[in-house]
Amino acid sequence: MLFLVGLGLADETDITLKGLNVVKAASKVYLEAYTSVLLVNQAKLESYYGRSIILADRDMVESSSDEILAAAVTDDVAFLVVGDPFGATTHTDLLLRARELKIPTKTIHNASVMSAVGATGLQLYNFGQTVSMVFFTDTWKPSSFYDRIKENRQVGLHTLMLLDIKVKEQSIENLARGRKIFEPPRYMTAAQCAAQMLEIERDRGEGAYGPDSLAVGVARLGADQQRMAAGTLKQISEFDLGPPLHSLVLLGKRVHDLERDYIREYAIDETGFEKNWEEQYGRMSVFLVHGFRWARNEIRVHVVLQEVDDAAPNNLMCGDSEEAMDENFRELYPGPMAHLPPLRFIEPLNPNTEKFKYPSEPYAYVADVVVQSEDVIDVTEVMNKGIRAAQWDAMADLRDIIAKGEKIGWFVVHNGDRHLAQQERLRKDEEGVNGMEDEANAVEKSDKKAGKFKKLFRGDSR
């Protein structure tokens, strides 16, 4: 049987009792030594486990796994993995090959960075896609991670970044000459990761994050020497967290005050941290919207050509703009609009730009579902309610007419306009009062005394 045994994050004592029993009983013990490393050496592991260990490098696991699997046909083989065995796709591939050979397998789980990152105080269910950052070279600076981070930020989620390690790597020259000469191990730091991220942001310029974006650098997670640092990407890019291993967490827009209270202890500059937090999260109205982006230049053209006099193209949330636009759409596009509720036109607004004014972004959101809060929104609960098929199709038809090519989906939109926050509260109050007045009018038809209740409801609405 092939056993995949998780070792945990720090040292030889992190192995579970079940895992230790497997290691002691196995005929052969391999240690996967390239997707991650423990903070202790092989000799210390062998002493604690009472077993000799065979180091399995990338070449052995990915290209020459036959040796490992052949032994598992007749005997028990333990394959040791730092963290949890399912933390890397390489290990899933090994299990699939064992399955093809009809070799029984068993996994012994352990702590992983994917769960232990909760030690930052950031809530695990607020994390989105995990991404990896590799060492850049002069000719190779991959930026595919940028798109995943951008997607996470669009729905307000944190991003865990796993940082590159170079173990048993060859230089290009030695590789070309076929010489088995290996470079010294290298481990990316949180500072290097932050610096590379800022470099890619300068190149891409899509605003996924910037020098003032908040993040938490993590070093030696799970060890007695664990250390964290919270601050802006610029601050972290200049901060030394000490020896490896490091990782980095980018804060999403959907944060809670409890998270702030927890990570404040790790602030590089507590006063600056509080200021940045207040600027980025403290005054925001949060909207969870279902819909699509509509480019600002297209909005302006539409408002002018259609003579929507009551709409303000630079701020579709002001005054009667939303109502005017919805009315205009129903006149122009009766087909899709027949299946849609009153549309909202949601504006993102960053209150910390040099010029605090609309428009803050070159687009607004056309939305058929909007949930607004000045606190945390339960995204999962809202999204699980789903969208009716006819409504979804109608939004797709409308999108194809006015914003072809834009993605339809769920977005978290932040607006730092304090006046807007007050306006949204008044909207909620007005909707509640209108609902009560409608109920009072219905009662009034059958009961003359209902007028007293109507007056009471109106009194509550002042």
Image (cartoon, rainbow, N blue to C red):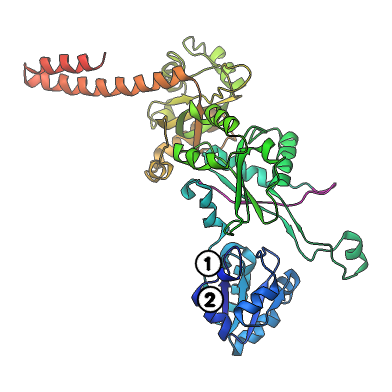
Residue name at image x 47 percent, y 21 percent? 332
- Using the numbered discs, state the Cα–Cα distance from disc 1 to disc 2 in whole angstroms: 9 Å
What stretch of residues is rendered in magenta?
127-140
| Residue 322: image location, x then y, percent | 44, 19
Find numbered disc 1 in the image and state the secondary structure of the residue it sits on. Answer: loop
| Mark 1 or mark 2: whose residue is earlier in sequence | 2
Assess disc 1: are there few (<14), some (14-19) or many (≥20) residues with their C-alpha within 10 Å of its C-alpha: many
Q: Position of residue 111 (x, y in %)?
A: 53, 63
Q: Which mark is residue 19?
A: 2
Q: Secondary structure at mark 2?
A: helix
Q: Are marks 1 and 2 in contact (CB under 8 Å)?
A: yes
Q: Which residue is mark 1?
A: 110
Q: Quadrant of the C terminus?
A: top left
At 16% across and 14% down in the image, what residue appears?
455
Locate residue 434 relative to residue 451 in the image: left or right: right
Q: Name the one closer to the observer, 287 or 366.
A: 287
Give above or below for 379 relative to 273. Answer: below
Q: Amino acid at mark 2?
A: Gly
Q: Amino acid at mark 1?
A: Asn
Residue drawn at the location 46% of the way across and 10% of the way down? 310
Q: Along the horizontal axis of the image, is 348 left or right of 27?
A: left
Crowding near pointer 2: few (<14 within 10 Å), some, many (20+)?
many
Quarter of the figure that contains the N terminus: bottom right
Measured from the top left, where is residue 105 in percent x and y? Answer: 54, 78
Up-down relation of residue 316 to residue 29 (above or below): above
- Residue 10 in view, yes or no: yes
- Out of 345 and 348, give the one closest to the viewer: 348
Q: Is 344 inside the magenta-drawn segment? A: no
Toward the front, the furthest residue is: 224
Q: Position of residue 381 (x, y in %)?
A: 38, 44
Q: Residue furthest top?
A: 309
